[in-house]
Image: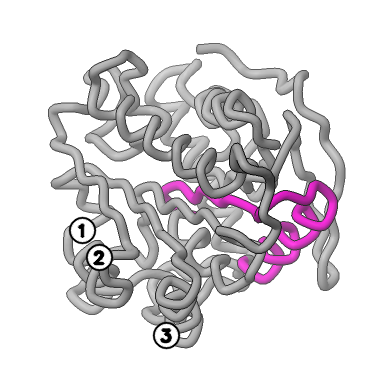
Amino acid sequence: MSDDSLADFDATPFSHDGSTRTVYRAGAGPAVIIITELPGITPKVAAFARRVVGVGCTAVLPHLFGVPGKDPYAAGRLSLVRYTVSSFASACISREFTLLATDRTSPVVSWLRALAAAEHARLGGRGVGAVGMCFTGGFALAMATHPSLVAPVLAEPSLPFAVRPATRRTIDCSAADLDVVRRRCADEGLEVLGLRFRGDRFVPSERFQFLRERLGDAFVAVELDGDTANPEAAGPPHSVLTEHLIDEPGQPTRAALDQVLDLLRTRLLPTRGGDDPNGV
């Protein structure tokens, strides 16, 4: 693929608590916050956002790192590695991302919750969706402490890095925040959707088991065999909705994508009987 101009997206600043970032928006309808994976808003992340627009939602992509629209694969694997490392370094320097600590919510989530609340106030509807990917996968879970967030999706949540047993059986969400999400699941029928490839060393099976234990049946795990990933993609199976997606009917990764879109459609869009502003 080549770079994506993102010409069909509007870019505007959003500020909260002294921090201002550019946010890219496209579409109409309830908001879905798409929290991009490393190394940034790639063409395939933008393609996923357009699928969200296609179901009747507004895709909202905050720029957290990288160069928006840049294709990291265009100049070869070495360029990909350099660009990813550069994006990762900038994220680390910002100190807004929790990389190794257990039971801790990344500081940037506060800004993302404010963005979700602002988009809900601006666009209305039954609530807001959030899709976190890889480095940001767990952010969608921590955002779900806010009542406006009614459709959280955790695509291959990779933080904290699974470098020791304690970090394998946890996710980058504080115990207090996770308890709020658990209560919302029990009291409001909130559902948390998680996606991963089996054997993905960045998203160990223990992490999904941990979420099952904490959230019960409200955590819906979609776990795919590695051989269902796009074999032409760089690296081992990891990015279910983007790089390792085989976008063809009958493919397991396409079925996973459709399940995500169905969740957003069901939770966010008006029912046939009319919109219930208090419903989830």
Q: Where is residue 251 in the image (x, y as percent from the top left)?
A: 24, 21
Please tell me how crowded label 3 is: few (under 14), some (14-19), or many (20+) other residues with Cα within 10 Å: some
* Amino acid found under the numbered disc labelled 3: Ala
Distance from the alpha carbon under mark 2 to that under mark 3: 14 Å
**Residue at x 82% of width, y 72% of height:** 17
Q: Mark 1 points at which residue?
A: 204
Give the mark nearest the N terminus, 2 or 3. Answer: 3
Identify the disc placed on residue 32.
Answer: none
Magenta-colored stretch includes residue 72: no
Q: In this view, does 202 lie to the left or right of 159?
A: left
- Examine the image and state in which quarter residue 41 appears: top right
Identify the disc placed on residue 175.
Answer: 3
Q: Is mark 1 on a helix, strand or loop?
A: loop
Please tell me how crowded label 2 is: few (under 14), some (14-19), or many (20+) other residues with Cα within 10 Å: many
Q: Are marks 2 and 1 in contact (CB under 8 Å)?
A: yes
Q: Is the magenta stretch mostly helix, strand or loop?
A: helix
* Amino acid found under the numbered disc labelled 2: Arg
